[in-house]
């Protein structure tokens, strides 16, 4: 079963929501992983299409960016979650769906690229 079918079947969502939500997670991974993201695109098909289907997740405010810089990791993670929640909302999905997408995407990444790819994505998404 491909990733989008698995998301649709397990979460009761439509194709646009599955594709856009996965795209949001992949965009975040691309931003955080830099050059290592090519390892993900090597094993997960159609990453570009899914990222193009992702809605704009909304910019993190200047104040939050400042807090992220000063406070480090926990504030940065909060900003990432806020941006993902905003994007998911545009897809008609609530913020709790972010937490439901992540394990499915990570398991799929593991099935395609082993623990290396799962761990790489997990650093960003968990």
Image: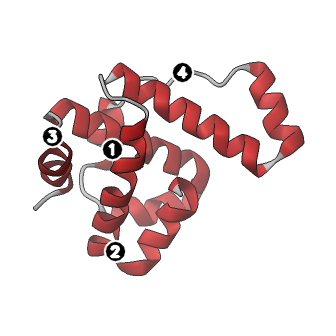
Element at label 2: helix
Q: Quadrant of the N terminus?
A: bottom left
Q: Residue at x 45, y 23 (%)?
A: 56
Give me the C-alpha separation between circle 2 and circle 4. 30 Å
Q: Quadrant of residue 38?
A: bottom left
Q: Earlier in the sequence, mark 2 or mark 1?
A: 1
Q: Give me the residue at 79% from left, 38% from top.
A: 68
In space, the residues marked 1 and 3 are separated at their CA atoms by 15 Å
Q: Dot 1 lies on which element? A: helix
Assess disc 3: are there few (<14), some (14-19) or many (≥20) residues with their C-alpha within 10 Å of its C-alpha: few
Could you tell which of marks 3 and 4 lies nearer the N-terminus? 3
**Which of the two labelled residues, at mark 1 and mark 3, occupies the earlier sequence position?**
3
* Residue 57: % across, % down: 48, 26
Residue located beneath label 2 in the image: 113
Residue 39, label in figure = none
Q: Which residue is mark 1?
A: 22
Find residue 58 and name its label.
Answer: 4
Q: Secondary structure at mark 4?
A: loop
Q: Nearer the viewer, residue 35 or 113?
A: 113
């Amino acid at each position: 079963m491909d990733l989008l079918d698995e998301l649709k079947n397990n979460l009761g969502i439509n194709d646009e929501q599955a594709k856009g939500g996965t795209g949001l997670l992949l965009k975040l991974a691309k931003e955080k992983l830099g050059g290592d993201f090519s390892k993900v695109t090597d094993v997960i098909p159609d990453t570009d299409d899914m990222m193009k289907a992702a809605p704009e997740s909304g910019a993190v405010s200047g104040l939050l960016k400042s807090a992220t810089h000063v406070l480090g990791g926990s504030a940065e993670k909060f900003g990432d979650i806020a941006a993902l929640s905003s994007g998911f909302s545009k897809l008609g999905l609530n913020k709790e769906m972010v937490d439901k997408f992540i394990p499915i995407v990570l398991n799929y990444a593991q099935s395609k690229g082993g623990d290396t790819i799962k761990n790489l994505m997990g650093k960003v998404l968990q």
